[in-house]
Amino acid sequence: MRATSKVTLALSLLIVLGFLLIFAGWFSARYAADAWRPSAAVVMQAPAQAEVDSPLPAPSVRPTEEIIVITPPPDGGVVNLPPAQPWQVYVFPTPLPPSTVEPPPTPTIIPGPTVTPLPLRSPAPDAAGYVAYSVIDSTPDRANPSFHHPERVTIYIARTDAQGLPEMSPTQLTDAALPVEDVAYAPDGSRILVVGEWGNRWVIYSDSGKVEPVFRDGADPVGLFFGWHPDSRHLLIGADLTVESGLWLVDVDTGEHVTLLQQTPHFSLTSGAVSADGQKVIYALKWDFEMPGELWMVNANGSDPQLLQKFGGAVVALTWSPDNRQVAFYGDGLMVMNADGSNLRTLSRNIRVDYGFGPVWSPDSTMLAFINYEVPTEEVNVFAGNTIRLVDASTGEEQLLLTDGSTGNIDPAWSPDGKQLAFVSTRSGASEVWLVNVDGTNLRQLTTQNQRIRFPFWGKEQ
């Protein structure tokens, strides 16, 4: 063999061997990479990694739709939600009902038997009769000496002739250890109601001076006293401390009562009055602060309630005219309306509502006497700065009862003929009973007892 052939063969073998070595190295490297490759669950992410590494844009992937159920708040308020992502959907379990305002419940009326009409009282021909008044013994409050706690009441009677002049010195009717807050005489003067400092009630019989609790067989339900029934035997009251709270008509001789209106926690009774013939009862309700006050009329047996008027505030001191045609009260000032609720009008805003003052009708139903806070004062007592005004119920014409500029005049009471008034005044120093003509003339002092006197009543002889 020639030398060149041998050299050529050797070079060919070397080339083949080089290729084999290169292939063996590549195969070994590939095998080692497979040996260190992650498990199959992880390998599923390799395409996504490849996509990231790829220069081409990644394909869009739609996430699974997420449904979010919204639970409405129990008070029906607004639900505040974050912005939803493209794959999120907000849903309510059921459609929400529209919000409504629930009206207050209607008071429960308990009808009773039909009531027989009573004859109306007409003015007497003259002033003959008697003036009754109360002397109240009290002790000063320790913290506020200007305020007194009543502890005892003594009732006196002074007889008057036809001209209203006293016929004799006052005589004592009765004396009782009662914490007096108010004294109210029945229309015929036969009974006297004493309301205690905490709302308890006693009746005094004028013919004997006997004192009895109104509720003889049980606790007094306590509450506001609204007025006497024209039959002079029944009281209209608000009963509070009882499960049967509401508007009661109470027989003072037996303590038994008829519930005309069952009260609920949604409203309170602020006033009431029985008509002059005993057929109707008018009463005022006050709902919560967001609701108006209401004036209702109902038959005296509790049937056929009728809404007469609505007011922005409370109504107090309801009083029916003796001719049964009009009702006066304190609302937006001293107001008067017809008995059916029509022709409502304000007669005066010069009124004082506190201390239990209320308007008083003249016997002929043409005028009203009321208390006016005439002169502002820092002194705090029932007399300070007060005087008496008269107003014509038809025209609204107003006048001072006394034109001498005096104050400290309260508790007006009309004479039986409506031509004079009795009232309590501190013009002589102590509180005493004074008499005067309607025009302010013939002013005269009836009592000189130098004691704390209140609540006069001018009755006529029966």
Image (cartoon, rainbow, N blue to C red):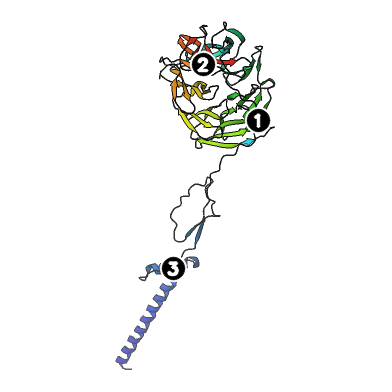
Q: Nearer the viewer, mark 2 or mark 3?
A: 2
Residue identifier under label 3: 46
Real-space Cα distance between discs 2 and 3? Answer: 114 Å
In the displayed structure, 327 sits above or below 413; it is: below
Q: Residues within 10 Å of mark 1 (few under 14, many from 20)?
A: many
Mark 1 or mark 2, which is nearer the start of the sequence? 1
Q: Disc 2 vs disc 1: Cβ atoms closer than 8 Å?
A: no
- Residue 158: x and y in percent read 57, 9
Q: Position of residue 204 (x, y in %)?
A: 64, 15
Residue 425, position as x, y percentages in the image: 48, 13
Say which residue appears at 53% left-offset and 14% top-offset: 454
Q: Secondary structure at mark 3?
A: helix
Q: Is residue 269 visible?
A: yes
Q: Are marks 3 and 1 in contact (CB under 8 Å)?
A: no
**Local SS, label 1:** strand
Name the residue nearer the viewer: 284 or 364: 364
Element class at badge 2: strand
Q: Which mark is residue 420?
A: 2
Q: Amino acid at mark 2?
A: Gln
Q: Is residue 264 visible?
A: no
Front tag of 2 and 1: 2
Relative to 190, residue 40 above or below: below
Which residue does the numbered mark 1 point to in the structure image? 259
Res 129 quadrant in image: top right
**How many marks overall?**
3
Q: From the viewer's perspective, is the residue at label 3 or at label 1 nearer?
A: 1
Q: Nearer the viewer, residue 163 or 454?
A: 163
Which amino acid lies under the numbered mark 1 shown in the image of this protein? Thr
Specify which label sits upstream in the sequence, 2 or 3.
Answer: 3
